[in-house]
Image (cartoon, rainbow, N blue to C red):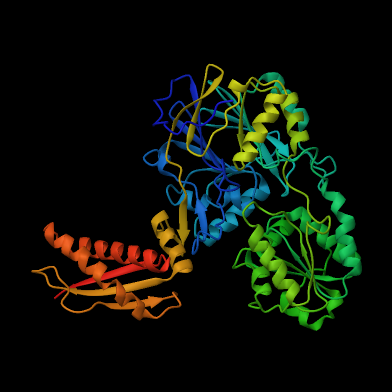
Amino acid sequence: MSHPHPELGAPPSLPRNGLRVVALGGLGEVGRNMAVLEHRGKLLIIDCGVLFPEEHQPGVDVILPDFTFLQGRWQDVVGVVLTHGHEDHIGGVPYLLKERGDIPLVGSRLTLAFVSAKLKEHRIKPRTTQVAEGDRLTLGPFDCEFVAVNHSIPDGLAVMVRTSAGSVLHTGDFKMDQFPLDDRITDLRAFARLGEEGVDLFMVDSTNAEVPGFTTAEKDLSPAIDTVFRTAPGRIVVSSFASHVHRIQQVIDAAAAHRRKVAFVGRSMVRNMKIAQDLGYLEVPRGLVVDVKELDNLPPEKVTLVSTGSQGEPMAALSRMANRDHQIRIGEGDTVLLASSLIPGNENAVSRIINGLTRWGAKVVHQGNAKVHVSGHASAGELVYCYNIIRPRNVMPVHGEWRHLRANADLAIATGMHPENVVVVDDGMVVDLVQGKARVSGKVRAGYVYVSAGNVGDVTEDELRDRLTLSQQGTVTVVALVDADTGRLTEAPDFVARGLGTDERMFEASVPAIEKALAEAAAQGIGDTHELEQRIARAVSRWAFRTHRRNPLVVPVVIDA
């Protein structure tokens, strides 16, 4: 199994008979999925998603893939294939199209509807090409064939990309539910046919590779959801991803059976469910869905709310309900149903919400205490089936944290793949397929790009560290009047402390450390204001840590006296 090498440099130029694959996101994390295929000077992008921030990334809205690899080459991009409509696969498209607005977006009907609605909010009108399973489409030197896959959103597609250097089968996100709610199963007959033809590189969804056996069928959740609707004494609040059409269909069916009205809460939920209903992916009996304002006139046992926020996102509807910061006041008699999985890293945020809702008297039903969620991803048993059916020449696990990628690689090897032909790589690592062999050939930049307050890339890792320090350790501002000629303090500095929970006067004891730092600077002939500020900041930081075990953010201000 080929492992990443930290000493990798920039990749060499690609041989004419080669195909290059670079994942700019989605490897080593669950989210911001994006792969770039390069052949004969042209580029094909598969997916462009976002990653949602964790607690150690305060003030960040979303995290994008790094497009540096594409700078100067935007004109070579022949298209973006979108495998399905989840945010971690389409959320980055608006930012991509700001680099070049006329890149064709290729996807299924629902996927394009979701991404077009998102782009409308960014005032971007995309060029789109709608495809369905069985379709073939030529984009530059890439011949793409689309295959139906089952996932936790309708209309998912895998894509087989044929080139003169070889073929790549990318599964997108998928599972193999044999009894899906929409009767659209993952097309294993097509996978077998492509396997017979020959798949040179198989890029496989790894999210559930550690889970043994088979992923539970969606329809197996219906009894648990029905039990909630049958036994809840008052209102039911269901929280789900705003794109999980199948799950919301089950909720609508249960609400209709128990004569409850349904209202959608949260902008993305309202928008997506209207699109799904208009396109016929969501079947809603006439009069069942009402506006949230109409709920006040209904008795609690006739009310169902469907909201966003199942991952504990701080600004989503459910989080605000738990914090009593929402028009919907959760209380005794309410039942809250968390109908989606935990994305790794969100456990604490979700736990806080469950506690918050329980505190107000609600009963919370979640995957930990009831069978109300199944994953959208293939478990180990399904992945092994795929390896045995397709018999690929090379395998590259995608979509998952390191443990998921490694587990997926182990499954491929267990089915008889030679370890040398299984490449486990990180974001930015370059895999070249040349004469039927996939090998790591280098590394390109693929760091996190933060969107904060709508601005892309303004927040650096240093800035995030400062924000964390501010939130955990507080801040102290030091205003020092320094004689420009002697480099000495002309009077005692002023200190303004915030978030330290101590008297500002405690910092007066740091003045000798400041004087020493200024004396050293003067001895070295340093009088530059910025450099003096840096030295004062270091001196106060060291003093605060040494004497009080505190590590505040120090903001120095030097004024020439």
Picture quadrant of residue 199: top right
Image-based side of 230 in relation to 537, left or right: right
- Give me the residue at 48% from left, 34% from top: 429
- Give me the residue at 40% from left, 59% from top: 463
**Above or below, 503 relative to 307:** below
For the residue pair 258 and 274, the one nearer the viewer reads as 258
- Give me the residue at 75% from left, 30% from top: 384
Rendered-image quadrant of the C terminus: bottom left
Picture quadrant of residue 175: top right
For the residue pair 47 and 345, the one nearer the viewer reads as 345
**Above or below, 416 relative to 293:** above
Q: Position of residue 110 (x, y in %)?
A: 67, 50
Farthest-out residue, front: 547
Image-based side of 481 in relation to 336, left or right: left
Q: Position of residue 103 (x, y in %)?
A: 49, 43
Q: Position of residue 311 (x, y in %)?
A: 66, 60
For the residue pair 2 and 267, the one nearer the viewer reads as 2
**Above or below, 520 relative to 260:** above
Q: Position of residue 307 (x, y in %)?
A: 71, 66
Rendered-image quadrant of the N terminus: top right
Residue 400, visible in the rendered structure = yes
**Above or below, 499 relative to 59:** below
Farthest-out residue, left: 485
